[in-house]
Structure formats: structure tokens, C-alpha cells
Image: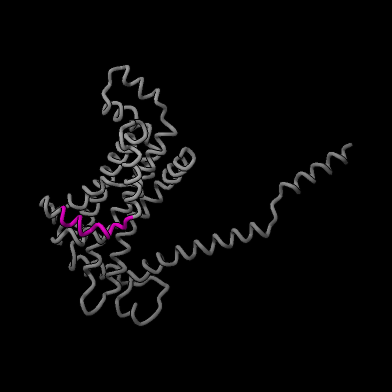
Amino acid sequence: MAQQVAVEKQQKTLRHRKPILPRLFIYISLSLLAIVCIVPFYIMIIYATHSNADIASKFIILPGQELITNFQRMSASVNIGRGFMNSLIIAGSTTIITLYCAALNGYGFAKFHFKGRNVLFVFVLATMMVPMQLGLIGNFKLMATLKLLDTHAAIILPSAANAFAVFFLKQFIESSIPDSVIESGRIDGAGELKIFNRIILPMLLPPLSALGIFSFIGAWNNFITPLVLLFSQDKYPLPVLVAMMQDVYSTDYGLQYLGVALSVIPIIIVFSIFSRQIMGGVAIGSVKG
């Protein structure tokens, strides 16, 4: 009897034991993918510590001693602190406006039945297929008409129309927020906007956290829109200032790599801190939707 139990236990263990070759293949593939992703960042940081002559003449894998010199020359070339502040203002304001407007629109599409709702929602989804660069000329003319050119508002206000965020939040609201919650607020005498702000918005924190980080990263890295709509150097965000460090006839690679590293490091920190919120929000949206 004991021998039979031992045999059954061994067979059960063998059935649940995964073959070693598939697991080894997965580990090797993931390791190679990690190396491919990490190497460019490593090279960027290493090159930021070397002079332009060293970068142009040889392949470098070890840190240099020109980091402080490069930073001093970069500070003399552009106002890097002002660029950080401009990027923070644009990215932060864009994130707040995007999340609130997307949540409000998604709530309207999900819980309010009005004539032409489906047609309007299809039109919203269709805008996702239009490249942002295609509407840049129209955006420029609109901001010129509104006299908002060369202001941060010209970058921030168009972010209110984010089709993907509207779609994502609409799917979440439809599947996760019951109508009874809204009806209870109406019975208590709350207006529609108060119901949204006091009841619906707090329930949207998981997907909003994920969308907020993606929106912040996208706004921080936005290059083409500020380049077209802003004219004053003191209003440029960090990516545009980094591009301005390139001379007409030559490129100082040390400054370029240092500028890119400074602009990327905050994004890496934000993503590292809030990575769990990103994955949790995306998982909730995919399961619920």
C-alpha cells in the first residue's frame, strides 16, 4: 500500500514538472531581450561622460571623466533647469486634463443614452487612426486663431481629446460600474456632475493611474508639437532644448547624450515607481473590458 502511494506521488510529481528545455529557452530569450533593452541606455550614460573627440574616435564601454565638463557646457548652451520646469508643467497639466476629460467623456458614452451616441463614438475611435502629425497644420491654424501660439496652452489644451483614453475608460465603466450606484446618487438629490466627481471618479482610480502614467510619459517626450507651436526658447520643453544643442555643421555627441540621459532618467524613475499601478490598471481594463 505504501509503495503504491509512493508510486502515485511520483507520477503526480512528474506530470506537474515542466520540461527543462522550454523553460531554458524562455529564460535565455528574456535575458537576451533584457540585454537588448539595457545596452542602449548603458551606452547613452557612458557616452555622456566622455568628450566629443573620444566618442567620435573609438568605441567606449567604460565611464569617462568629462561628465561635469559636459554639464557645464550644456548649462552654458541652454537653460536646462527651465527646460525641466517647462516639461513638468506641460506633462503635468496634460495628464490632469487628459484624465478628467477622458473620464467624463467615457462616463457619458457608457451611461447616457442620447441620439447619435454610437455614431459619435465611432467617430471618436476613427480619430485614433489619424496620425498626430497629420493634424498639426490644422492645430497650428486653430491656435493662431485663438492667439495661443507660443504658449504652453497650445500644447496642453488639445490633450483633452484623447480617443484611446475615452475608449479605455468607457469599457471599464460599462463593465464595472452598475447603474444602481448612479441611481442611488440621483435619489439622494445629487446632480450629474456631483455624481461623477464624488462617486464615479474615485471608482476609476485603477485605470486612471495607468492612463495617467502613459499620458505623462507621452507628454514629457513630445517633441514635434512644441517645436511647431512654440517660438521662444524659454518656453521649450526638455526634448526640444536637447535637439537645439546640435550645431548646423557639427554635433557635440557628449552634450547630446547627456541631454538625452537627463530627459530620460525622470521617465525611468516614474515608470519604476508606478510599474505595479500600470500593470494593475491595464490588467483591470483588459479583464473587465
Q: Tell how many labels.
A: 0
Rendered location of residue 278, percent (x, y): 42, 46
What secondary structure prevails in the magenta region? helix
Instruction: Judge whether residue 138 is colored magenta.
Output: yes
Rendered location of residue 87, percent (x, y): 24, 54
Instruction: Judge whether residue 273 is colored magenta.
Output: no
Rendered location of residue 257, percent (x, y): 31, 68
Quarter containing the N terminus: top right
| Residue at 38% over, 38% down | 170
Rendered location of residue 88, percent (x, y): 24, 51
Left/right of residue 74 with respect to residue 282 in the rendered view: left
Task: Name the quadrant containing residue 121.
Answer: top left
Span shown in magenta: 130-142
Q: Is residue 179 above or below residue 4?
A: above
| Residue at 83% over, 42% down | 6
Taking depth in this image into account, of 15 and 73 the one nearest to the observer is: 15
Taking depth in this image into account, of 242 and 262 the one nearest to the observer is: 242
| Residue at 26% over, 75% down | 252
Left/right of residue 233 with respect to residue 108 in the rendered view: left
Left/right of residue 29 with respect to residue 179 in the rendered view: right
